[in-house]
Image: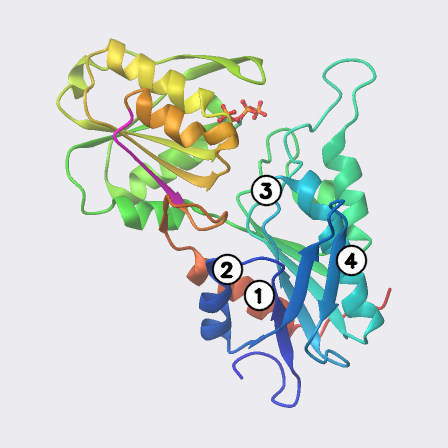
Amino acid sequence: MIVGKSSERVVLFCLENHPLREKLCDQLGLEQGRLEFRRFPDGESYLRIDTPVSGARCIVLADLSYPDTRYLAHLFLFETLRELGARSVGLVAPYLCYMRQDRRFRAGEAVTSGVFAQSLSRHIDWLITVDPHLHRYHSLGEIYSVPTQVVQGAPALASWLRGQNDLLLVGPDAESEQWVASIAEASSHPYVIGAKQRLGDRRVEVALPDLSRYRGRTAIIIDDVISSGRTVGECVKALRLQGMEAILCAAVHGIFAEASDQYLLAAGLQSLVTTNTIPHSTNGIDISELLAPPIRHFLNQDGSKSR
Ligand SMILES: O=P(O)(O)OC[C@H]1O[C@H](OP(=O)(O)OP(=O)(O)O)[C@H](O)[C@@H]1O
């Protein structure tokens, strides 16, 4: 075993198949936990843990996209591991949900990011995630009360882009500039940043600067998350208006709500690649090697918090 003391078992559990499960177990020498998970006809969860966990450190690898259908089942998993004697329960949530409603934009709104973080913090010992949507928060520590580590997806995107020729990186909005710039620098491609206005859940407007000097290049839109696909879709429209013909997109988290990947391909996007934070057919960039060091960090800390 690569992590922890040799006598300690470290067991990784996953409620559903996840492309990172085997990779993380192989890279870190973790034991794969067995469990039975299904839904009763009324949608309630049935869960049975089939691997002894008494005294073991447990890691849960969770896909938390569409959280309203998945979160409760994960709470049952965290608490059952604990009841069965797990020494600690850490969470690897490559995509961290409920990060976008980070303030009360209109009087009376629920600040769901804070409520969700408080709830999750009560059930886990530590949290690792990839590029959480930190816009108005500066760090996860503002809302999470357990130790957290954030992995940047940018190096994985940059190495995927390195070696490709005549690209122009396109960030949809000012918030994307910091990391689009770092990917551009690491992969030696030029970049531009658009100005985005969000008008509703499925309504955004994106304006791009003059691109005439980049004509002939392949534009690649870079974003942290694709949900309704409207942000990327509006970028595609703005690029086409300026005569850009080859248009691709690379994103860290592909949620693709309401089959928006199909909408984007129909809108003129030629290809779409995402990292494997959320299982999807577009997963073409593996981030397991970026997740392994922070997992090792928590396991080597010998830091099971007694709750
Ligand atoms: O696929 P979509 O439905 O368009 O959603 C994805 C977009 O939404 C997010 O930003 P958002 O507009 O929420 O900006 P924010 O940082 O102000 O929350 C995110 O950074 C993407 O650009």
Q: Residue furthest right?
A: 307
**Distance CA(mark 1)–CA(mark 2):** 6 Å
**Distance CA(mark 2)–CA(mark 3):** 18 Å
Q: Residue at x 53, y 17 (%)?
A: 202
**Distance CA(mark 4)–CA(mark 1):** 22 Å
- Going by the numbered disc 3, the residue's amino acid type is Ser
Q: Is mark 2 within 8 Å of ligand 1?
A: no
Q: Which mark is residue 295?
A: 1
- Is 290 one of the magenta-colored residues? no
Q: Earlier in the sequence, mark 2 or mark 3?
A: 3
Q: Residue at x 67, y 72 (%)?
A: 301
**Distance CA(mark 1)–CA(mark 3):** 21 Å
What segment carries the magenta color?
269-274
Label 2 crowd bin: few (<14), some (14–19), many (20+), radius 10 Å: many
Label 3 crowd bin: few (<14), some (14–19), many (20+), radius 10 Å: many
In the figure, is residue 86 to the left or right of 204? right
In the figure, is residue 52 to the left or right of 296? right
Q: Are marks 1 and 2 in contact (CB under 8 Å)?
A: yes
Q: On screen, 172 above or below 147?
A: above
Q: Position of residue 218 (x, y in %)?
A: 19, 29
Q: Residue furthest left?
A: 216
Q: Are marks 4 and 1 in contact (CB under 8 Å)?
A: no
Q: Residue furthest front?
A: 41
Q: Earlier in the sequence, mark 4 or mark 1?
A: 4
Label 1 crowd bin: few (<14), some (14–19), many (20+), radius 10 Å: many
SS assignment for the magenta stretch, majority:
strand
